[in-house]
Image: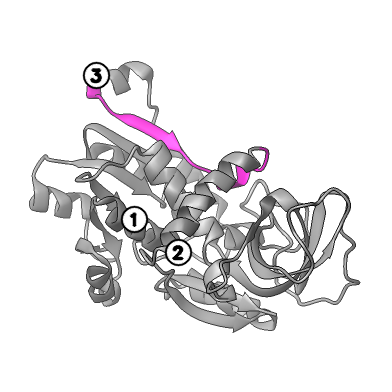
Amino acid sequence: MLQLREAPDPLPRSGEVRLRVEAIGVNFADLLGRAGMYADAPPIPYVPGYEVAGIVERVAQGVTNLREGEKVFALTRFGGYSDVVCVPYKQVFPRLEWMSATDAAALPVNYLTAYLALVLMGALRPGNRVFIHSAAGGVGLAALDICRIVGAEAYGTAAPAKHDLLRQKGLLHPIDSHDTDYELAVRELMGDAGFHVVLDLLGGAHWQKNYRLLAPTGRLVHVGVSSLLPGKRRSLLHVARALLSTPFYTPLRLMRANKGVAGVNLGHLWEQPEMVREWMAQIVQWYDEALFRPTIDQTFPLAQAADAHHYLHARRNVGKLLLTP
């Protein structure tokens, strides 16, 4: 259950800055944490939220690259659903002068995840064929933007009502995610050609199917497990069934198939801030060059965070959901 509570403004510790928050990103990991299915989440009660945009309100000792009043955005690793939050300075990024708070709050989790999955782990190249699950979600649309920028061909799954927008965004062939077996649809469309990169945000029973969709030298990148939470409450039976379908990618099997498998969890890279800053610099450069703008579906008041979660659970969104204090 999400409840809005009052608390004293926190004081930044050495190496931290305090931000006055203007916009907050909502992510599926927030939903998993609320359902008790996110292993990295702190003990309940805790404040969710992985990303914010705002203004530096206070600078602690040991911070030399940020100043009070500066417009920034940040990775928060929980605590983001707040009007004031303290963040280590290495997780804070200056905003471009013409970057809105809403655009900035939509960047960190989705675009870093897509960049890590496609460019780094997926070794994306121009002309590659890419298959994106949940292509109309925040990570999916970020991946679609990156495919367009790099020059890759993007295919993917989404609800039929979202197909027209996805085509406008550059998706070559959207597949119905509700009433169609996407593996069969891909075979009918492409034969045995397969994909160079498959971005799996679903997990569970989809692990094996996505592996079969790879072309020789293809890379399957596991990004999420949204299929483990089909409803609003945790089902241990559903989780157990999904975990029983976990594939075993043995080295010999991968060598015989000439395929690669990788996993991505941005939340486990907090100890590598310099790498993350390098990736974010590339994303901000693309933004500065007007090569993309994040798609923001809807903004909710922070007091209505539960409504935002219900909206995301129902898969109604096309792009990013945000909260504003």
- Determine if the magenta segment contains residue 266: yes
Label 3 or label 1, whichever comes before in sequence order: 1
Residue at image mark 1 = 133
Of the residues tagged 2 and 1, which is closer to the observer? 2
Q: Residue at x 12, y 40 (%)?
A: 193
> Residue 57: x and y, percent?
81, 70
Residue furthest to the top in view is 252
Kindly report the distance in space between the C-alpha atoms of the residues bearing marks 3 and 1. 26 Å
- For label 1, the crowd category at 10 Å Cα-Cα, with few meaning under 14, some 14 to 19 and many 20 or more, is many
Circle 3 is placed at which residue position? Answer: 256
Q: Position of residue 290 (x, y in %)?
A: 38, 67
Q: Secondary structure at mark 1?
A: loop
Residue at (12, 48) in percent of width and height: 187
Give the residue displayed 10% in from the left and 53% down from the top. Answer: 189
Earlier in the chain: of badge 2 and badge 3, it is: 3
In the structure shown, which secondary structural element does the residue marked by tag 3 occupy?
helix
Pointer 2 with pointer 3, Cβ within 8 A: no
Residue topped by disc 2: 288
**Magenta stretch, residue numbers:** 256-271
- For this view, does 137 lie left or right of residue 152? right
Q: Is residue 168 magenta?
A: no
Mark nearest the camera among 2 and 3 is 2
Residue 181, quarter of the rendered image: bottom left
| Residue 164 in view | yes
Kind of residue indicated by mark 1 = His
Nearer-N-terminus badge (2/1): 1
Q: Quadrant of residue 191?
A: top left
Disc 2 marks a residue whose amino acid type is Asp
